[in-house]
Amino acid sequence: KCYEQKQYKNSLKFCKMILSNPKFSEHGETLAMKGLTLNCLGKKEEAYEYVRKGLRNDLKSHRSDKKYDEAIKCYRNALKLDKENLQILRDLSLLQIQMRDLEGYRETRYQLLQLRPTQRASWIGYAIAYHLLKDYDMALRLLEEFRKTQQVPPNKMDYEYSELLLYQNEVMREAQLFQESLEHIETYEKQICDQLTVEEIKGEMLLKLGKLEEAAAVYRFLIDRNTEKWSYYAALEKALQPCTMEKRLQIYEEVGSRHPKALSLKRLPLNFLTGETLRDKLDRFLRTNFSKGCPPLFTTLKSLYKNPEKVSVMHELILGYEASLRTCGLFTPNDGGEKEPPTTLLWVQYFLAQHFDKLDKKDVALEYIDSAIESTPTLIELYYVKAKIYKHAGNLQQAARWMEEAQSLDTADRFINSKCAKYMLRAGMVKEAEEMCSKFTREGTSAMENLNEMQCMWFQSECADAYRKLGKFGDSLKKCHEIERHFVEITDDQFDFHTYCMRKMTLRAYVALLKLEDVLRKHSFYFRAARCAIEIYLKLHDSPLTSESTEQEVNAENLSAKELKKVLSKRRRAQKKAKLEEERRHAEKERQQKNQKKRRDEDEEEVGGPKEELLPEKLEKVENPLEEAIKFLTPLKNLVSDCIDTHLLAFEIYFRKGKFLLMLQSVKRAFALQADHPWLHECLIRFSKVVSDHSNLNEVVCKVLCLEMRKIFGSKNYETFNNDFLKNKSNSIEHLLSGAKMMYFLDNSRQEKAIAIATQLDERLEDRNVEVAWVFVSYECMIVSLQALLGDTCTKVLEALLDRSFGSCIPQAEGYRKACHRLFPLATAFTPAVSEDDKAFAPRNHNSIGRDLLTNEM
C-alpha cells in the first residue's frame, strides 16, 4: 500500500521490519518489494541485488525499471505457479497493452473476464483487445452484451453510459457499418450527453449513405450552431452538390441571411468566385475588415495567393484604398458618408507590407511598414511584421532586433516573448534567447533547465539548430537527446491510463491515445531533432573532433608571420573570453546542482532516481557516431517512411558503413517517392560509382545491385544519366547545383563548366530566392560563416562553391556572391562587408583556430 501511494520511506521501514524476523528473512515478495522501493529511490545497484534475491525465492517483475519485456517474462513464470492470481493477470495485461502485445493482451483479458465476469473492466478490456486487433464483429458483440447489463432508464443521461454508446458507435464506423451506426446513434441519442458529436456522426453517416437531403438538414443545423467551422460548409456543399459557381454562392447567401455577422460566410466564397463577382465580394470583405481593424486579415486571405487572378484583384483594390485614404479619407473618391478614421489607413498599410513581402518585393514592403510605424509607433503588430519581412529577406540579425523591439512594447505578452526568443535563436543569439525566455520561467533556476522540465520542444528544437549552426555540436546533440527523452517519457506516461480510462469509461479518448502513441515519433518535433542529430553524427564521422593543441599546430604552419600574429592576438582574446565563460558556466552549474539538491531534499522519493547527465563534451566525442545516428534513424524508418529525407539520411549512414544492400534499399524507397529529387540524384550517382569501383563484392550481391540499378538507370551510364538530369531540370537552381556537383565529382577536369551551370541566375529559374539558416564552410585554414537556406536557394550554391564541392574556386565564389548581392541586397549572406554589430552575431566554429575569420577577409 505504501509503495502504491509512493510513500517509499514507509514502505522501506515495513520491509526491514518483516525481513528482520528470522522466519521471514528470505521472504521473496518482501525482498522484491524492498528492491522495487530502493529502485524508486534511485539506489539501482542495491535494488537489483534485492530483486534478484526475491526472484530466486518468489517470482516478481522488472516493471518498475521499465524493462517491460523482462517483466512480462517474470509474470508469465509467476502464472505457472498461480494461474488464477488476479493481481498478476491485471499487471500482465497492463504490460502487454503497453508493449502492444495485442494477442497476449486478448488472452489475458479473457482470463480476467472468466475470473471476474461481473466487473465492468473485464468486459471493456476484452472488447478493446478485439477492437485493436480489428476484429470488429467480436468487439461489437461484447460491447452489446455488456450494454444490456447496464441499468440506465431510456430518457436518463448518464455520462459513463453515454461514453460506452459513443465508443460502440465508433467501432461500427471503423468497421464501415454506416447504416448500423446511423440507426444506433438515432436510437440512443437521447441518452448521449455529447449532442454535438451525435449530430456530427449523423451528418457524416448520411453523407456516406448518399442520403443527401437529410445530410444537408443536419449540416444546416450544425452551421446554425457554429457558423465559423469551415468543415461544415464543405460538407453542406457536398450534400447539396451545386453544379455552378452561382449555385455555390447561393448556399452561402442563404445561410448568410440568417447569420449576417458570420465571417466565414463572407470569406469562403472568395475561394471559388471569379470575375466581377469576386471583385465585388472581395471589396466588401476588405472594407469591413479594414474599417474594424483586423490584424489577422492577411493570414485569413493568405491561401488566395495561389491564384494569380485573385492576387491581381486584391492588389488593385488595396492600392486604390491606400491612395484614396491618403487624399480624401475614403476608400474611393466616389464614396459618400463620413470619412474613415485614421486607423483605417494604418491597417491598409499594415496589409500592404505583408502583401508586398509575399510578392517578394521587400523594399516596397519596408516602405509601407515604416510609414505605418511612423504614424503609430506603439503598435506591436507593426514591429512584428517588420521583423518577418527582414527574416524573409535573409537578414536574421535585423529580424531579431525588430522582434525584440516589439517585445519591449509589451513585456507581459508571452506569445511575442516566445517569437522574439525564436528569432534570436535563428540569429545565433542563444544566450539572449535564454534571457528572453527567463522572463516567463520559474525563478531560482536557469531558463534552459526549466524549459526542459516543461518539455518545451519548440525551444529545444530551435536551440539544437542554433548550436549546430554555431558549430557547437555537443550542445546541439544535448538538445536532440533531451527531445528524444521527452518522447520516451510521453510513451511511459501512458502506463497510468490503462486502468484509469477503463475505470472512468473514457474509452474513445483512450483508444485515440493508444493510436497516437503508436505513431508518436512521427511528430515533427522528433523528426526535426532526429534529422539534426543524424546530420551532426555524420559530420563527426567525416571530420572527428581533434584536440585544440594539435589543430593549432597544424594551422600555425600555414600562416605568415603577420597572419600568425593576428591569429595569436585573437586567440588570446578568445582564451580570455573562454575563461570568463567557463567561470560563468561553473557558477551556473553550481547553482543548478544546489537547486537540484534542494528539490531532492524536498522530494527524496522521486521515482526512478536521477537520470544520466547529458554532457556536451561526451556527446560530441562518441566512439561510433554512425551507431548513434542509427538510433535516431530507426523510428523514422518505421514511422516516417513516406518522407524522402528519411531514406536519404539512411543512405548517407549506410554509405559510410559500406552496407551496399541497405544503400540500395534506401535509394529504391526514395526513388519510389520522388524520382527527380536533387539529393537523391547525388546519392544515385555516388552509389553507382562506388559499386562500379568495388571489384571485390560478393558475386550474388553484385548481381542484385546491377539488376536493381539497371531499373533506375536503364541502359545509360552514370555520366549520361547526369547529363539528362541537367537537361530535364534546367529551370531549377537546386537541381542544376546537384547535377553540376556530380559532373565535377565524375570528372574533375570539367570544373569550369560545372561551376558555370551551378552559378546561373537567369530569371527563368523557378527557385531563384533566398531565405535564412546558417552553414559552416572551411577553406584551408579559414572558416567561412554564411547564412544559407537549407533548400532551394542561391545561398546553397555559394556554400557549395566554398566547401570544395567544385574544388578550389574562391574567385568564382566571390563573383557569385557579388551577383547575388545585386539581386538580394538585404540578405546578409551576400553582403560585401560585415558590420561590427553583425560580427557579434556571426556564427563561429568552435573547433578551428580560424574561428574569427570571415568570408570577406579572403
Image (cartoon, rainbow, N blue to C red):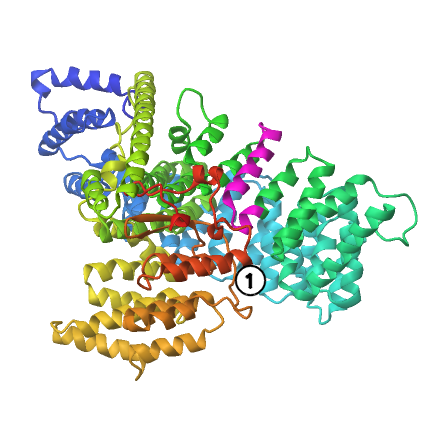
Q: Quadrant of the N terminus?
A: top left
The residue depicted at 80 percent of the width and 52 percent of the height is: 323
Write down the quadrant of residue 582 in the picture: top left
Q: Residue at x 67, y 44 (%)?
A: 369
Above or below, comparing residue 300 to residue 647 in the picture: above
Q: Nearer the viewer, residue 196 or 185?
A: 196
**Which secondary structure class fits the magenta region best?**
helix
Residue 757 location, x and y as percent? 42, 70
In this view, 831 is above or below 24: below
Q: Is residue 832 left or right of residue 691?
A: right
Q: Which residues lie in the magenta part?
A: 390-412
**Regarding mark 1 in the picture, which secondary structure is present there?**
helix
Residue at horizontal 27 percent and vertical 24 percent from the top:
3
User: From the viewer's perspective, is residue 27 above or below residue 628?
Assistant: above
Residue 837 seen anywhere in this rendered image of the structure: yes
**Please, what is the three-letter code of the amino acid marked with disc 1?**
Gln
| Nearer to the camera, 39 or 346 | 346
In the picture, measured across the screen, residue 255 lies left or right of residue 73, that is: right
User: Circle 1 sits on which residue?
Assistant: 179
The residue furthest right is: 336
Query: What is the x, y in percent for residue 68?
Result: 24, 41
Q: Quadrant of residue 490?
A: top left
